[in-house]
Amino acid sequence: AQSVAQPEDQVNVAEGNPLTVKCTYSVSGNPYLFWYVQYPNRGLQFLLKYITGDNLVKGSYGFEAEFNKSQTSFHLKKPSALVSDSALYFCAVRDLGNNRLAFGKGNQVVVIP
Amino acid sequence: SQTIHQWPATLVQPVGSPLSLECTVEGTSNPNLYWYRQAAGRGLQLLFYSVGIGQISSEVPQNLSASRPQDRQFILSSKKLLLSDSGFYLCAWRVTGTGAYEQYFGPGTRLTVT
């Protein structure tokens, strides 16, 4: 089965510093990868996806993600973090052969003013 | 544009009472629909998904059930709630037939079983 791993429980970053949220994947075949953000007591919001093509994918709210096939990674990045970026971030991969997404456990991001 | 609605937003129910959560999607046809539960503000657990009217796939055996009486309506039910049913319930949809696999989530229902 396809899966993703988010190795860190929480990422703390100072406002204005670069933000990176890590995700590694395990798939058979070509991966379809996604990032979502969740604010407290809200549903998940879709940020960006990688299907094929350019390894650097740009998404909403200034976020981007870099697909690295040799490292089986799909890290989410933002050049300059805002306090409002404090939220829970989920990486996901399409589960081939069915209609599901497999989600990681989530990363809490705390941006310190 | 597409919109997804869930209601109620919050619900407090006693143990042993029934449950009905509703989800509707606007602006799309024949979507895939999903019910997730999120406990303790972290991981997502897929409960059910549906690829069409009356077609339900159950991912986790439990005292919950789902139904899809109309193309854009998805209902989560229980005859008797347990304390362990407390959590944040999320409905999601995805468009079919386009090669897009991202899912779009509703605002969620916070269920507290007392």
Image: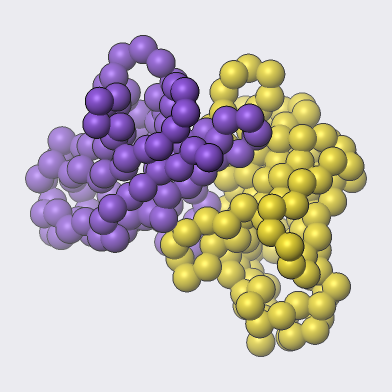
Chain colours: A purple, B yellow
Tell me which residue sits at (27%, 21%) in the image: A56
Q: Position of residue A103 (x, y in %)?
A: 47, 47
Q: Which quadrant is home to the C terminus of chain B?
A: bottom right
Q: Position of residue A84 (x, y in %)?
A: 28, 52
Please determine whether, in this image, residue B27 is positioned above or below residue B66: above
Residue A19 horizontal side relative to residue B11, left or right: left
Residue B1 horizontal side relative to residue B28, left or right: left
Q: Position of residue A17 (x, y in %)?
A: 10, 45
Please determine whether, in this image, residue A98 is positioned above or below residue B82: above
Answer yes or no: is residue B97 visible.
yes
User: Looking at the image, which is closer to me, B18 or B10?
Assistant: B18
Q: Which quadrant is home to the N terminus of chain B?
A: top right
User: Looking at the image, which is closer to me, A101 or B27?
Assistant: A101
Please determine whether, in this image, residue A44 is positioned above or below residue B95: below
Question: Where, by quadrant of the figure, is residue B47 drawn?
Answer: bottom right
User: Looking at the image, which is closer to me, B35 or B25?
Assistant: B35
Q: Position of residue B49 (x, y in %)?
A: 72, 45
Residue A53 horizontal side relative to residue B52, left or right: left
Tell me which residue sits at (29%, 24%) in the image: A69
Question: Where, by quadrant of the figure, is residue B110 drawn?
Answer: bottom right
Q: Residue furthest top?
A: A53
Tell me which residue sits at (63%, 78%) in the image: B84
Tell me which residue sits at (57%, 57%) in the image: B45
